[in-house]
Image (spheres, helix red, strand yellow):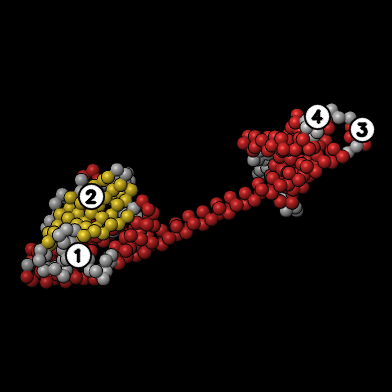
Amino acid sequence: MTTRTNLLHGLTLKRFLTALLINALIAAALYRFVWDHNFGSAMVSTQVVGLSILLSWTLASNWKQTRVPPLFAQLLAVVCGSAAGGVLVVFVKGYDLEHVIMNPEGLINLVSLGIMWGAFIVLIVVAREREARAQAAMHQAAAERHLHGKQLLEARLQLMQAQIEPHFLFNTLSSVQHLVDTDPPAASRMLGDLIKYLRAAMPQMREQGTTIGREAELARAYLAIQRVRIGNRFDFSIDIPEILLERRFPPMMLLTLAENAVKHGFETKSCCGEIRVTAHETGNELVIEVRDNGAGLATDCPAGVGLANVRERLSTLYGEAARLTIEENVPSGVCARITVPNQTPAAAAGSAVPAAGAA
């Protein structure tokens, strides 16, 4: 099937009106010098020649051929349009053709003026179109780099999720093995929490987004396991309004905040404390906080590798619309806060999370 080329493509009303304005400006600038102070005559000549140039240039721009370079073809179209426009001016104004042939200076001046101004304007238009294409290509390349960076980051996340922190699993299973001999009921509860953790974590290995409810369930199972493993040094609570449970949220970020609260807050602290997980919405933003009253982050590692990864992922996913904030929790401990755009609920409902998840 052969497709026809539209030779008038681009001849829009805006471009037509722009040509009329440019022709009028040329007439206003030169009518005293070229047309003997006759502005009306100047307007007729510039409009006829200018519109003839516009038509021929449009035809040359849309003519699909490979023998002549496009820019040369467009400049040649300006010459042809100027010549054709000059001849049309002779007929429009009713000049005697024989007199014009015998005295061609006026026609030559008109055509030369059309070629000069037409070529100048065409070069400007071509330069602007090339600049616009270059800008579009640059933006497209930047968008592709951003997309590739996002895909690479998500691939790294999925790899980390697939590993499911073997040392955490080994430590948990070792604790279960110890409790089997010393406290069988506690071993049974810990094994149940591990099953809940794996059940919540496994589906997210293949997803780039999940719900607050499922993330909170994952954090609840993790905190229950860690609470027993390190000797009941902290209690925890999860307080998330039911209306927020199905809101979209990036996977594994809440778990990272919970991990840091345990690692930096209570693994090296002997006294008992508390970890609180809360969520609320503020305008168009969704805020999740993990607050603890433990030892806090070490001064030589104020952010931690996990938190640095969270900040990098937020930047890739949302740009400046999301942020991770780390603050001191008075009188002790840390408050880690993730703020993301408030998205619509996911299609699939998340797991329900109890208001208080202390084991």
At 80% from the left edge and 34% from the top edge, which residue is drawn? 35
At 15% from the left edge and 54% from the top edge, which residue is drawn? 237
Between the C-alphas of marks 2 and 4, the distance is 77 Å
The numbered disc on residue 279 is 2
Between the C-alphas of marks 1 and 4, the distance is 89 Å
Between the C-alphas of marks 1 and 2, the distance is 21 Å
At 55% from the left edge and 53% from the top edge, which residue is drawn? 135
The vertical placement of 240 against 196, above or below, is: above
**Nearer to the camera, 299 or 253:** 299
Q: Percent x, y for residue 71?
A: 71, 51
Q: Is residue 225 visible?
A: no
Which residue is label 3 attached to?
98
Nearer the observer: mark 2 or 4; the answer is: 4
Q: Amino acid at mark 4?
A: Val
Which residue is label 1 attached to?
296
Q: Amino acid at mark 2?
A: Ala
Which residue is label 4 attached to?
92
The numbered disc on residue 130 is none
* Mark 1 burial class by Cα count in 10 Å: few <14, some 14-19, many 20+: many
The vertical placement of 110 against 167, above or below, is: above
